[in-house]
Amino acid sequence: MTARTSLDMWKSRNQIIRLYDVLLDACLFLDVSHNNRLFNVFAKAQRKYSNLSCPVKANLIYAFNQFYIDEQQLPSFIPLGGFRSLIEYSSKHKLTARIITRGKIVPRP
Ligand SMILES: *[C@@H]1O[C@H](CO)[C@@H](O)[C@H](O)[C@H]1NC(C)=O
């Protein structure tokens, strides 16, 4: 199984910055700690809020429950604005799951 994952941030209405877009083995994504801190935030949230674990087996149901991104996990340098994270799992080149997280970093009140 493979995982394709990307993260885009909106700097302004029409300026989108792609922070990463990678294709990797699903188990590498889930089980390994990564150097890119933002990348880790999404990988860790998946471990925490799902029963998805490696090796991923066919004919089993995996569930996500109350998935969210903890703001404490975000790096302090994160720019304000909207973001979209995409995670797509594919098996034998067939899409099996797509998780899209949309959010907005807003200034502290
Ligand atoms: C994951 O959790 C869901 C919902 O609780 C359950 O139906 C499913 O069997 C679980 N899957 C595994 C692999 O444990």
Image (spheres, helix red, strand yellow):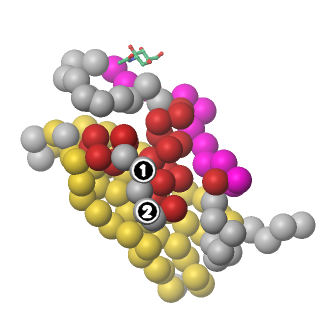
Q: Residue at x 52, y 73 (%)?
A: 9
Q: Which mark is residue 35?
A: 2
Residue numbers of the magenta segment: 61-72
Above or below for 30 versus 11: above
Q: Residue at x 19, y 40 (%)?
A: 1
Q: Visible in this render: residue 65?
A: yes
Q: Which mark is residue 49?
A: none
Local SS, label 2: loop
| Residue 54: x %, y % from top left | 30, 30
Q: Residue at x 43, y 62 (%)?
A: 35
Q: Visible in this render: residue 86?
A: no
Q: Kindly indicate whether the residue at mark 1 contacts the one at mark 2 (C-beta within 8 angstroms).
A: no
Q: Which mark is residue 33?
A: 1
| Residue 72: x %, y % from top left | 70, 53
Residue kind at label 1, given as amino acid type = Ser
Quarter location, residue 5: bottom left
